[in-house]
Amino acid sequence: MLHRVIVAIGRNGYERVAPPLAEFEDELVGRLKSARAQDLLRVVDPISQRTLALRPDITAQAGRIAATRMAHRPRPLRLAYGGPILKLKTTQLRPERELIQAGAELIGSDSVTAAIEVLGVAIEALETAGVTGITVDLTLPDLIETLAAGPMPLTPARLERVRERLDAKDVGALAALDGQDYLPLVAAAGPIDRAVARLRLLDGVAPLAERLDAVERIAAAFAGRVGLTLDPTERHGFEYQSWIGFSLFADGLSGEIGRGGSYTILHADGREEPAMGFSLYIDPLVDAGLGQEPSRRVFVPAGSDPAAAAALRAEGWTTIAALGESDDPAAANCAFILRGTTPEPLQPSS
Amino acid sequence: MLHRVIVAIGRNGYERVAPPLAEFEDELVGRLKSARAQDLLRVVDPISQRTLALRPDITAQAGRIAATRMAHRPRPLRLAYGGPILKLKTTQLRPERELIQAGAELIGSDSVTAAIEVLGVAIEALETAGVTGITVDLTLPDLIETLAAGPMPLTPARLERVRERLDAKDVGALAALDGQDYLPLVAAAGPIDRAVARLRLLDGVAPLAERLDAVERIAAAFAGRVGLTLDPTERHGFEYQSWIGFSLFADGLSGEIGRGGSYTILHADGREEPAMGFSLYIDPLVDAGLGQEPSRRVFVPAGSDPAAAAALRAEGWTTIAALGESDDPAAANCAFILRGTTPEPLQPSS
């Protein structure tokens, strides 16, 4: 399943990188704003006496590769990755400590075109994995800060309180807080056409209009292919995203199956670089039994020609060799048996 | 590369298992004789306050699955695995702490037929990965103990000293030790036909004759396909193997690329179960650039039909989308550009 997703991402020009599972902690918690030391499983390396940390996420590692080893490479730089991550804390929905993450990062741009590319690659990878009924929830992570610093001014202290009320979707408290300017943002959450139409009513708020134009371009690119919603104030889990963030869901799969958005990579010289990316969680797809192709299993009796069995494997058959005369094709779950060079159907015993 | 190897193993009826990267230490250092606590990278889990260990090997984990979760499954049980392992100590040849291991275990038999199957799967997986010029070095790990307990008797104290001299291939010391019975074993190491012929001269030593018959059957199964040698006393790294062990090498690849052999799985009730398996090391194959297929890269100008690009990806093309008018197909390493629905060759600028 991971292979299938990585191949789909790679066909969009994303080059595979393979960051290490364990890194020196100071290198893992560096560059990108996302990595938090308290989320790491740490181990003291008895040889170097330095602290190693197990990665809880591959995005930050890919960002570091873009900012160091691949800093000289032309932009846009497209990187893909996939492999295990280790979580210190688990959730009720996902009690496993170890998860498989795949993803892609487009380094050098956070434009609307970049957002459409990245979201398109994520959707295509999920479709290739057999996922259907995909829904994309868009959010505008830094919208409140942008509005508060401009057309809908808030002092830092009031901004903090307005944010808390928005996170809680607490309309009453927001009004009591004299934050009624922001009330339409709560009411707007929902299917994308309705949400955008409601937000357009906040007439003459320039940064908002620009974001809505972007959201409409994104929505138009995927209309009819996936479901789209907008919650303009949702920021949970998007703490390090800039203007756009998205979560991916699908019919029959519990919880979020991916997320992404725009962000900023910090270079060692202080330079900031725009980027856009996504991560997919592979475990829910595997748990749902997606992408399993039934194998054609043929039992190979003792004394068969090894070349005949090898030829069948090359055609995609799974061959089960007898180890002794008493081996049972049925116990080996085979529906076929090799006779000469031909697989013949086995009759189920009546 | 790992995917290719795992698929090749799977086509021989080996079912994929995915043991966790980190396990509670007492569970990892359990069952199988191979796992050594001092080789483990350990971390105290802050939540359970138990010690987690990162796996240095997947073989032991597969053995544990066979003895617990799959104890009730019919035998022979065929398991495949692949993924990262973490080494506390590294070698000069392989300074990386993190390596990718793939492998297969055949549980329930350690017969000559099982040995031929397992070695054949290992060779086929390497061949599928593009490895050529494969050599198999066979060894007979418990031969000395078997001979010392039977036809060529040694007291435990003398056995230990004879073993040390054999490990050092120290012929002079072996003779001085009154271990001359064992001298032919040292002299026999080499190409398999010659080695077996020399060992046959040790007339009338029953357990040896039986082993040589087995070695000849294995050699016959792979004659002309791989190089075969026998060193009957080599035991370095085969401490937990029983009657047969093997190392895999190949032209152009430095160091051992795989190993395996027969061993015993200990069940919780004290029962011992014969097994046969192998591990392959994927990193040397990747480092050698094996299995890389050149990708056909096509640049997709802004305004192209997304469906045309998607159709090319479905045919195996890699598409690189323009993010702006200024993007350069050459910088994106594309030899083709999409015109309408057709990739057209790009002329290198002169």
Image (cartoon, coloured by chain):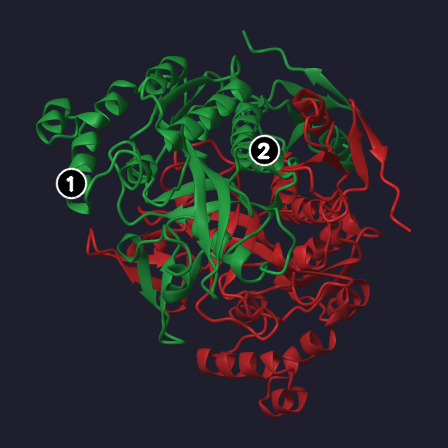
Chain colours: A red, B green
Residue beneath the point at 41% across and 31% down: B246
**In what element is the residue under mark 2?**
helix
Nearest the camera: A57 or B271? B271
* Residue at the far left in the pictured view: B176
Q: Which residue is mark 1?
A: B158
Q: Amino acid at mark 2?
A: Arg
Residue A114 seen in this snapshot: no
For this orientation, the residue located farthest to the right is: A350
Q: Quadrant of residue A294?
A: top right
Say few, some or many: other residues with alpha carbon within 10 Å of mark 2 (under 14 / 14 to 19 / 20 or more).
some
Task: Provide residue A128's location: percent of width, then percent of height.
Answer: 73, 44
Q: CA distance from mark 2 to mark 1?
A: 48 Å
Q: Are marks 2 and 1 on the same chain?
A: yes
Residue pointed to by mark 2: B4
Residue at 50% from the left image edge and 66% from the top image edge: A239
Return the chain for callout 2: B
Inspect this view and state whether residue B310 appears. Answer: yes
Residue B148 location (% of width, % of height): 27, 38
- The tag earlier along the polypeptide, 2 or 1, is 2
Label 1, residues with CA under 10 Å away: few <14, some 14-19, many ≥20: some
User: Residue at the spot x=33%, y=27% of the render?
Assistant: B232
- In percent of width and height, residue A46 lies at 21, 56
Q: Residue B208: x, y in percent?
A: 37, 29
Q: Amino acid at mark 1?
A: Arg
Q: What is the number of the mark on residue A234?
A: none
Front residue (pair B108, A297): B108
Which residue is at the far front? B204
Q: Nearer the viewer, residue A219 or A246?
A: A246
Question: Which residue is nearer to you in this view: B8 or A105?
Answer: B8
Vertical relation: A77 (above or below) A178: above
